[in-house]
């Protein structure tokens, strides 16, 4: 069982930056594929970025070059650094941990990110 708690969301102006953090409990954190997803009102939940235990990353095309993902296995955290934010980045951001890409894994409760002037 893994529990995930996100933090770092908030209101930011276009062009600004935010750093989201996800803290995990439970064992075997270093073996999990960690990911950040987002869901805007009326839309499906989509992958933003993921990071495997081996260090491979995957980013949505819309965030490439603006977002980075990192993890600290000793602290059991995964961060999402978001730069050059746009209004279309507004969504609830969820942390996910899964042992295999085909499994749903575990979800955090989400944190709201609003990009607006």
Image (cartoon, rainbow, N blue to C red):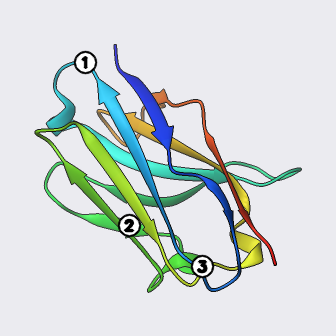
Q: Which residue is mark 1?
A: 26
Q: Nearer the viewer, mark 1 or mark 2?
A: 1
Element type at marker 1? loop
The residue sitting at the top extreme is: 1
Query: What is the distance, in whole Å, between disc 1 and disc 3 at their CAs?
Result: 32 Å
Residues packed near mark 2 inside 10 Å, few (<14), some (14 to 19) or many (20 plus): some
Q: Nearer the viewer, mark 1 or mark 3?
A: 1
Element type at marker 3? helix
Query: Which percent across, then down, holds residue 43?
Result: 82, 53
117 left or right of 85 in image: right
In this picture, is 37 found above or below 80?
Answer: above
Residue at image position (61%, 38%) is: 110
Q: Which numbered disc covers residue 62?
A: 3
Element type at marker 2? strand
Residues packed near mark 3 inside 10 Å, few (<14), some (14 to 19) or many (20 plus): few
Residue at image position (17%, 36%) is: 31
105 left or right of 60 in image: left
> In the image shown, does 42 or 92 lie closer to the viewer?
92
Q: Quadrant of residue 116?
A: bottom right
48 left or right of 78 in image: right
Task: Please tell me which of labels 1 and 2 falls first in the chain.
Answer: 1
Q: Which numbered disc covers residue 37?
A: none
Query: What is the distance, in whole Å, between disc 3 and disc 2 at their CAs?
Result: 12 Å
Task: Please tell me which of labels 1 and 3 falls first in the chain.
Answer: 1
Residue at image position (13%, 55%) is: 54
Q: Which numbered disc covers residue 58?
A: 2
Query: Which percent across, then down, holds residue 86?
Result: 69, 80
Query: Which percent across, then down, holds residue 66?
Result: 48, 82
Residues at discs 1 and 3 in contact (Cβ within 8 Å): no
């Amino acid at each position: 069982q893994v529990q995930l708690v996100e933090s770092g969301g908030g209101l930011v102006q276009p062009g600004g930056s935010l750093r989201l953090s996800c803290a995990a409990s439970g064992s075997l954190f270093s073996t999990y594929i960690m990911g950040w997803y987002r869901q805007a009102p009326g839309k499906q939940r989509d992958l933003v970025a993921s990071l495997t235990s081996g260090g491979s990353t995957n980013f949505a095309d819309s965030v490439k070059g603006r977002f980075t993902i990192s993890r600290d296995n000793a602290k059991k955290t995964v961060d999402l650094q978001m730069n050059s934010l746009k209004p279309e980045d507004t969504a609830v951001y969820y942390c996910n941990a899964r042992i295999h890409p085909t499994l749903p894994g575990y979800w955090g409760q989400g944190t709201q990110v609003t990009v607006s002037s």
